């Protein structure tokens, strides 16, 4: 009788023990330790969103803390296999640690914190987000206008100014014509906006002068080259320079262009200059000193320097990234920066012809606006890889 009682008491324990040993190792419970399998991106600036994948993260952000080389950050969202978290401002390069209710796991690889700091500014207050807008800066103010929303063909015909001193946006006098993919050249205290696409989604040769002092627009001499989009333009030493880009004929045939032109605002005339060594559709570009740099596109991996004093082109060190389409350039001091697409932000040093990757505010952004005010770069608007357009605006401090 005693033997039967012992067997009866022992049998449930055996059953429970067997059941526990037979549980799937992937089954999550409150006592399972978290596991990191990967994180993306593997590098970026302070504030960028990082997605951590793994298991046993739970269902709530409350008990979860993520550490970037010891710097703590509270996640934006958590589910059992994914954590989305922003890199904290004090983070440095190192391993990622995830703590769930005190249980911790450490990544096998390190997250690289890139130099430079992006600071969120007030969004462009226009009702609709936009991409393919144009932008320029004069003094302490930046201007954004035109563009489209996503893949729409409806062009915006507005102009906005951002006052960096007061951190305020104000709508200005609309230009007489709506542009997208327009070229801008700042010469003195005036801006010149033209080429690009206009209503009807056709390429244009028009150029307009904007005077911020009087908030007025004046039609100037048309660009003498063929109508085009995805061109570039800059103002250097009292003259404007524009060209390259993509032409489309009546039959829909496209052609990348290499021609290059100089504009003199004193005489309202254009003069053809030496063509670029290669045709460039939607080149990445920036101006530094007397030099203009262009290249780094999907079809042209080279990087070329145009000397405005000698009217000559010289090939320089190629962009080290994947040469995506039309990164946007700005200049701080004697350094140039290219930002956008999936490449983030890269610094170009003309003095020694070298590149260095910098922080960026987004994982992907194409067709932004970019310009320089003082010792800072400004970027915003554009479209992401999912086709969403934006009104956000950011300040970059090297």
Image (cartoon, rainbow, N blue to C red):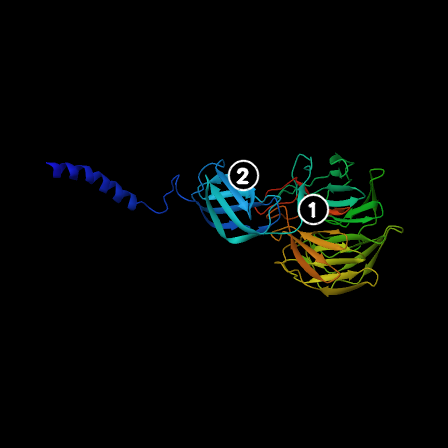
Tell me if residue 68 can be seen. Answer: yes
Label 2, secondary structure: give it.
Answer: loop
Q: Residue at x 54, y 39 (%)?
A: 76
Q: Are marks 1 and 2 in contact (CB under 8 Å)?
A: no
**x%, y% of residue 2?**
12, 37
- Rendered view: 127 above or below 383: above
Residue situated in front as seen by the camera: 36 or 254 = 36
Residue situated in front as seen by the camera: 137 or 192 = 137
Is residue 40 found left or right of 168 in the rendered image?
left
Q: Quadrant of residue 47?
A: top right
Q: Residue at x 56, y 42 (%)?
A: 72
**x%, y% of residue 180?**
70, 45
Who comes first in sequence, dot 1 or dot 2?
2
Q: Quadrant of residue 148?
A: top right
Residue at numbered disc 2? 76
Specify the farthest residue to the left. 1
Q: Quadrant of residue 381?
A: top right
**x%, y% of residue 26?**
37, 46
Is residue 45 found left or right of 215 in the rendered image?
left
Q: Residues within 10 Å of mark 2 (few under 14, many from 20)?
A: few
**x%, y% of residue 69?**
56, 49
Tell me if residue 252 can be seen. Answer: no
Q: Which mark is residue 132?
A: none
Label 1, secondary structure: give it.
Answer: strand
Q: CA distance from mark 1 to mark 2?
A: 23 Å
Residue at numbered disc 1? 396
Q: Residue at x 45, y 44 (%)?
A: 81
């Amino acid at each position: 009788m005693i033997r039967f009682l012992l067997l009866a008491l022992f049998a449930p324990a055996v059953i429970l023990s067997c059941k526990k040993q037979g549980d799937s190792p992937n089954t999550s419970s409150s006592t399972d330790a978290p596991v990191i399998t990967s994180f993306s991106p593997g590098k970026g600036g302070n504030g960028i969103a990082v997605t951590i994948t793994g298991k046993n993260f739970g269902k709530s952000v409350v008990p979860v803390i993520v550490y970037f080389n010891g710097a703590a950050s509270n996640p934006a969202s958590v589910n059992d296999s994914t954590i989305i978290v922003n890199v904290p401002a004090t983070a440095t390069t190192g391993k990622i640690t995830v703590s769930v209710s005190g249980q911790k796991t450490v990544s096998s690889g390190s997250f690289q914190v890139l130099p430079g700091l992006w600071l969120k500014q007030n969004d462009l207050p226009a009702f609709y987000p936009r991409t393919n807008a144009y932008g320029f800066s004069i003094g302490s103010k930046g201007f954004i206008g035109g563009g489209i929303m996503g893949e729409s063909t409806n062009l915006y015909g507005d102009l906005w100014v951002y006052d960096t001193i007061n951190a305020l946006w104000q709508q200005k006098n609309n230009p007489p014509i709506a542009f997208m993919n327009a070229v801008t050249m700042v010469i003195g205290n005036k801006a010149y906006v033209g080429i690009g696409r206009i209503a009807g989604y056709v390429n244009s040769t028009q150029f307009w002068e904007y005077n911020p002092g009087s908030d007025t627009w004046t039609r100037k001499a048309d660009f003498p080259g063929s109508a085009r989009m995805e061109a570039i333009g800059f103002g250097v030493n009292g003259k404007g320079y524009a060209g390259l880009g993509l032409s489309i004929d009546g039959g829909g045939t496209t052609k990348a262009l290499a021609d290059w032109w100089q504009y003199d605002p004193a005489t309202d005339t254009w003069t053809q200059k030496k063509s670029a060594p290669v045709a460039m559709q939607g080149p990445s570009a920036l101006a530094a000193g007397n030099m203009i740099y262009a290249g780094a596109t999907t079809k042209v991996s080279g990087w070329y320097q145009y000397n405005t004093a000698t009217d000559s082109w010289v090939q320089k060190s190629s962009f080290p990234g994947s040469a995506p389409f039309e990164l946007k350039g700005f200049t701080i001091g004697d350094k140039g920066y290219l930002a956008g697409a999936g490449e983030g932000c890269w610094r170009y040093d003309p003095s020694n012809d070298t590149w260095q990757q910098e922080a960026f505010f987004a994982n992907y952004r194409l067709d932004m606006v970019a310009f320089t005010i003082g010792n800072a770069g400004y970027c915003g608007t554009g479209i992401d890889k999912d086709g969403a357009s934006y009104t956000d605006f950011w300040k970059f401090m090297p």
